[in-house]
Amino acid sequence: MSAIEIRWVSNRTCRERTSRPAFPVGSNECDRDPRNLRIAPDLRCVSPMIFIRNESEHPDIDEKVIRQAASATLGMHDSQACEVSVLLTNDNAIQSLNRQYRDIDAPTDVLAFAMREGDSEPLNPHLLGDLVISVPAAQRQADAHSHSLDVELANLTVHGVLHLLGYDHRITADATVMFEKQEAILRLI
């Protein structure tokens, strides 16, 4: 698979991003709808820096799938100049992080640690954040949904990068926007 080179038609850069999602083209509700995606093929994409570390001991990880999912998500938000790191791990390690940072003593599928939350200026405007993905959780979810581990890893990567970009799903209206955007991205990769 080759990386998809797309961008939201927007003049917003990752340095201008606030704690809100980087919505494309203007600020009205219509422009926030993922169905209004406009691809600008004449715009040159910058390759995002995506660092992947596999500590999961799972032999069948295709890092290209994770890289493509992260790149497509960043590209759709005009954030190609941003850096994301992805740690692939096991249930015990992600449970420990979940307990430490969220006070939830249970494993989860993906955690996102955004480097640009709040109103303060980030130390490095190109650092978007870190994702931690439990490969065993991804495999269980892939089995439950009858699709491959690669598909589930792409799904979790897109979901996590959307969190890094400021999206959330705690409120129903926000969840609708986030999951529609997630599905739109997954259809493109």
Image (cartoon, rainbow, N blue to C red):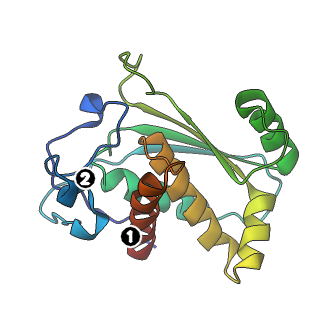
Name above or below for residue 24 compared with residue 103. Answer: below
Amino acid type of disc 2? Cys
Question: What label sits on residue 45 in the rendered view?
Answer: 2
Task: Give me the C-alpha separation between circle 2 and circle 1.
Answer: 19 Å
Q: Position of residue 81 (x, y in %)?
A: 32, 39
Count up the numbered dots.
Answer: 2
Point 80% across, 51% down: residue: 56
Q: Position of residue 132 (x, y in %)?
A: 66, 44
Q: Secondary structure at mark 1?
A: helix
Furthest residue in direction right, as rendered:
92
Which residue is at a point 37% across and 50% down the rendered structure image? 74
| 115 horizontally vs 81: left or right | right
Q: Position of residue 60 (x, y in %)?
A: 74, 67
User: How far across and how far down the image is residue 115, in percent?
Assistant: 49, 28
Mark 2: few/some/many CA within 10 Å (<14, 14-19, 20+): some
Vertical comparison of 56 with 22: above or below = below
Q: Quadrant of the C terminus?
A: bottom left
Q: Observer-nearest residue: 78 or 42? A: 78
Q: Quadrant of residue 41?
A: bottom left
Q: Quadrant of residue 57?
A: bottom right
Q: Secondary structure at mark 2?
A: loop
Is any atom of residue 8 visible in this view? no
Q: Which residue is mark 1?
A: 184
Q: Is residue 30 visible?
A: yes
Apparent side of residue 42 relative to residue 162 in the rendered image (left or right):
left
